[in-house]
Image: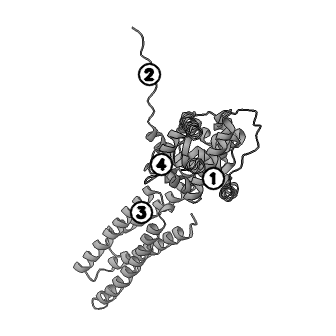
Amino acid sequence: MKCETVQNLLDDYVDGLLIGEEPEMVARHLASCPDCARLANNLREMLQNAKGLSRHIEPRRDLWPAILEQIENEPKRRVFRTVRLGVLAVAAAVLAILAGSLLMRGLPRPGETVLTAVEAPVRLQQEVLVVEAEYQRARRELVAAMDQLPHRLAPETRTVIDQNLAVIDGAIQEIRTSLEKDPENVFLFDMLVAEQDSSLQLLGLEEAITSNTW
Amino acid sequence: MAAIMTEPVVDENALVTSAQSGCLSSFESLYRMHSGRVHGLCLRLTGNAAVAEDLTQETFIRAWRSLGGFRGDSSFGSWLFRIAVNAVAARYRSELRRAAWEAKAPARAVQFDPTLRLDLQQAISALPAGARAVFVLHDVEGYRHEEIAEQLGVAVGTSKAQLHRARRLLREMIQP
């Protein structure tokens, strides 16, 4: 092996990257060539020194005040985001409370139209289908938006929204069960109208997430 | 009986969690723990004290902005280091690209006075940016070529060529 070839292989040789017969051929050459052996030793020594260089070098001045100033002067994205997400969480909670409180409502209000025994069940069943379809669509879009854009929601906010969705689901299930027992109950119909409003608000949440307007 | 003096135990994970919730004082503690290491890397990679301080500052500002995304898959120090290398690479992107091309040509010595024998630290600072970055990351910090290539946005072959060039230039500079 010629000196020039060995010197070109020297980096890989000291790094242990040569394969096959090359390491042995280089070693044999180094054993018989003082110039190349000296180069190899110098390289090893330099690499040893490089590994020994201090990796911890303090800056000449304290950089923290400048870092702090820049952080504090930045647009309050973190705070803003938290506040806005907090509003959304509250909105979701309000929906849940609304759905739950409606379940507690009892008697008809004075002056309200009361459907006949024949009309009411048909109308209510139709409305149930419409309202549930609307709610489920809004719910799917909201969940899809949250899944696709998780970085726009703090984990704790997502948890709150999921919990509130579960409460709304529970409320709908209770209304459904109540309607099965009392298909002529107009107040349950009112509840479903309220739920429809809730679903529209959920659509608003989904738009806020996808358009990043919070 | 002599009082036993002990260093206060600092729970880095707790500091990170606290900083993630917006606590600047915890983030300052993290800065105090890691600033020397980050600055050391920036200084070696750039060879310029003023630029290194600027990049150290930038690293911590970027870290603050991205803290919410830190999940603890690696240590906080490693994560910070990665941000620092990215910051340096971004600053010198054009210089590194140019250096990558230069690496394909036969290595030539940088301008230095051959009568002066530089120490290793000075010699590293005198290297061209691309060669310096790869040498520092590979031979000082212990990164593999694949990791360097990924971080600097160059091919693995370029990283190897730059290392070869850096070592050759350093030998010329520091050896009589």
B176 above or below A11?
above
Determine the CA span between mark 4 and mark 3: 69 Å
Q: Quadrant of residue A143?
A: bottom left
| Residue at the top extreme, as displayed | B1
Q: Earlier in the sequence, mark 1 or mark 2?
A: 2
A168 above or below B112?
below
Q: Earlier in the sequence, mark 4 or mark 3?
A: 4
Determine the CA span between mark 1 and mark 4: 38 Å
Task: Tell me which amino acid carries mark 2.
Answer: Thr
Residue A161: which disc?
3
User: What x and y, as percent, mark residue A189?
Assistant: 35, 79
Task: Tell me which amino acid carries mark 4.
Answer: Met
Q: How many marks?
A: 4
- Residue designated by label 4: A25
Write the residue at 44% across / 22% down: B6
- Residue designated by label 1: B89
Determine the CA span between mark 3 and mark 2: 46 Å
- Residue designated by label 2: B6
Q: In which chain is the residue bearing label 2?
A: B
